[in-house]
Image: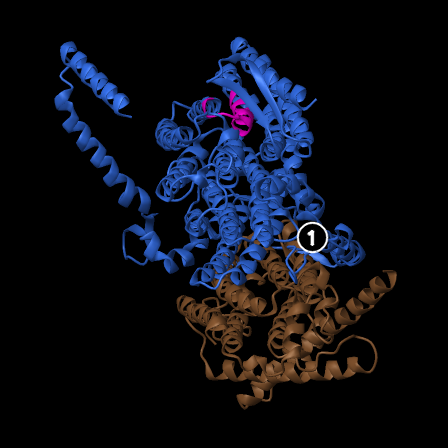
Amino acid sequence: MISGLFLSGIIIWLAGAMASLALWRKPVAARRVACAAALAGSLLDLSASAFAIFSSPTAISLPFGNPIFSWAVRIDPLSAYFNVTLGVLAAAVSLYSFGYLREMEGRRNLGAFGFFFNLLLMSLALVFTASNVFFFLVAWEVMALSAFCLVSFEHEKKEARKAGVLFLVMSHAGTGLLLIAFLMLTSASGSLDFSSFHLLASTMPPLRQGAVFLLFLFGFGVKAGLVPVHIWLPEAHPVAPSNVSALMSGIVIKTGIYGMARVFFDFYGPPPLWMGTVVLALGVVSALLGVLYALMEHDLKRLLAWHSIENIGIILMGFGAALMFRALGQPNLAALALIAGLYHTFNHATFKGLLFLGAGSVVQSTHTRNMEKMGGLIRLMPVTAICFLVGAVAISGLPPLNGFVSEWLTYQALLAGFGTTQSLTRLMFPIAGSLLALTAALAAACFVKAFAIPFLALPRSEQAADAREASLSMRAGMAMLAVGCVALGLGATWLMRVFDPITQQALGVSASSAMVMARGLALSPGTAHGGTISTVGMALLFLFAGAAFALPLAIRWRRRSVRGPAWDCGLPGLTADNEYTATAFSKPLRMIFSALYRPRREIEAEYEVSPYYPSAIRFESEIEPTFEKHLYEPLRQRIMASAKRMKAIQAGSINAYLAYIFITLILLLLFGVRG
Amino acid sequence: MTELIMTRIIESAAQLFLLVALAPLVTGVIRTLKARLQTRRGPDIFQPYRDLFKLFRKGMVTPETASWIFAATPWVVFFSTVLAGLMIPMVAADAPLGLFGGVLAVIYLLGLGRFFLALSGLDTGSSFGGLGSSREMTISALAEPAMMLAIFTVAIGAGSTGLTEIAGAAIGQTWRFLAPAQMFAFAALALVLIAETGRIPVDNPATHLELTMIHEAMILEYSGPYLALVEWAASIKQLVLMTLLINCFWPVGLQPTWFGFGALIGIGWLLAKLLLLSCAIVLLETVNAKMRLFRVPELLAVAFTLGSLALVSTFLF
């Protein structure tokens, strides 16, 4: 049954892709077919993988290919878990797309869009399930290429083309690293099959083992948006159409996380300690830098893109801790840390998908991504505002929503880590914990800005004053994910069971029975005296207090309440110009962290009589893109310089090229004979 | 099982009453003591009750620019603060709602309240609200790592983030608070407490001067019952953080249960310890001037350093 459901999902996606391409001249039909196929495929994929989590692994071999390059998929609990994430997010995004794409009808080629959209979903499902190197890389490339086409879909904009190319280059650099790593594994196992890699990496000599680890870490890290190979992410995610941005941030970057989970917990046995510390340290750096750069953005979608880097960092903190616990021989703690990372992966897919869909509604309605031109949208777009608020509270890690639960689990894992070793390495755990606290608090600050500036107070521009609520299907898509954020927060204790097959397979332990307390009312980390939380309890008390006190009293006080102007210091009334801007909101942090940002600002004032009465002021402020300037720009120059030198052998004469081919052939033959 | 649930409900009700009833008194005592130390007469210690009573009977003005966020915020702030207060041990070592969350949940519930206060500051559309929100979120973010280090130190000692366990671990050893790790963590947490409750030298609760105010700027547009709720929640938050500090580090006088004569002794000890901490706060507020906003990060860096020292000393000593 699982294989039947899964294959029919794949086939519907493929059929949807072909059908919408065939219908490219009829935009209305193309849109409907593409979205309906995407939705149906997602639901099938979701139901298949929901069954598969609790079943023994299902292997499916497609009836083509040959023994070496076989088209084989295998749905084990880990694959199924990521497919559930994909199914939930893709269903909501497909629903949303019904309404979202309507505006593009007649202006853009929706047939092509539907083709790449369905192809992306299909390749994602295959990436999560492919069970040999060849098929994995094929799916990986289809995913990268269809994502590239969707990112640069609005190709008449220069920034979309530039971001698309950057994404493609970075993505392929990452694939190159993966290819080397896979070849090293293959040469050790003599097979391309993933099952032959099980625990294999740990049997290799230490140097090779470390090399394979780093290649995989950075190869998958490019896709995940790990600092310092993250630079494509804040460029590519914002320029894509918003439903694609939701998929990119929600699930496409999670393929990197999936790859790491597969390598770290399937291909490797207990790893040396340094691997875990590297992952933990990179996670902390990604989380902190992600949120610090997000704070400086006033482009709503770029801000969300930076937060994806932050959340990938939080996920990797869980993974890093899990690797360290594995090295230290603590499988139960490793299971806790792995669960924290995996749960945050799902949670991030829901709330970041939700936030990008909300941002998409806002951008479609106001025609700008600049927050400084929005404002007051809570009155014009009430449903979008509530959904965005739910996402903002969830991503800030505030109770009782889902972000709080996974961050709490991460804290618990880090806290428990201190007692596991006597070496100084143990200091890493509390320091990582305190920096996670800083990250979470800065994220809360950032989302006060990201919600309040676009949605609250007065509209800052005419476009914002004319905004209209999103269409029904768009609201339904957002509401679905908002409900998901609440359900994943309140239902955490009941969902912990899902992780048992995964931790059983990866680490040989089941954690959930120790983590659920008081008949599912409270969640505990499963350590000896670990603390407990009960998000359900908190939510019920809030509801009770709200219904018993807040509602009746608010209604009574309403009669004594009048509307009046806010205090305007005696000026003739408040206007939108008096409002605090997003730039002003983050100014204190820009000054405090100026060593990182190296902000530059320029103020020009025009005046006629005295400089104290300017007639016009121009203000410009920007921060230094550290990684681009100090890491990638020198690298690019090196590459260009060496390309220039290589020009000497590119004479253009066919004889010379034949000679090159001949020499290469001889060298390869000699190499083959010797090896 | 039902008996346990009934016990918990009674305990929660008792602690709830203590929280909401005691909080204005603590604020009043601090104000009066401060006035006396500055050779002013000052209001008597019950003035905050009269203020609240007066505000609750008044009408209110809601800004035309504000949305439903403005009306929802006082409730969210009040309820989340009270809920956090039920998770800490006040009189009995067992926190009534310890099952619902430990010290991390307390911090994040207070964070939920702050998140909504900052939103409502921006909701009014006046510059003051935005200014207050921006500063509040900045300072609280910078206070967070120091707080977490101190809490990790305490939690490592107790092997748990549950406050019942933390207080329980401290009860066993009366003089444990003299251990270097505990002292450093206490100092770090005390600095964070000053920043979080908006006291001098970080913020001045008595000022309405636009250049310096933080918390007051955020709530500038509130009036009548909503202002009363926000002010009340602020004093409850102060009480919660003060109780957290004294009962985590110096749990002397905590009773095994809420029932019987022991509860009165427990309340007596609580009041005595709160008075002592209030005196310390008053002294600190009187001998210090308010810092410039951009000097506050330095203070919090000191707190972070103290937190790190606390952590290192857990295994050095």
Residue A496 in the image: state x and y as whole percent.
Answer: 67, 45
Does the stretch in magenta take in A207?
no
Residue at figure coordinates x 59%, y 35% from the top left = A78
**Res. A32 in view:** no
Secondary structure type for disc 1: helix
Q: Chain of mark 1?
A: A
User: Which residues are drawn in magenta?
Assistant: A119-134
Position above or below: A234 against B30:
above
Q: Which residue has dot 1 on it?
A: A514
Against B267, is A350 above or below? above
Question: Which residue is pictured at 55% across the width and 40% down the height?
Answer: A352
Q: Nearer the viewer, residue A246 or A609?
A: A246
Q: Which chain is blue?
A: A
State which chain is coloured brown: B
The C terminus of chain A lies in quadrant: top left
In the rendered structure, the answer to whether residue B227 lies left or right of residue B284 reads right
The residue furthest bottom is B39
Residue placed most toward the observer, A587 or B130: A587
Q: Amino acid at mark 1?
A: Ala
Q: Check disc 1: other Cα within 10 Å, few if <14, some if 14-19, many if 20+.
A: some
Q: Is residue A129 magenta?
A: yes
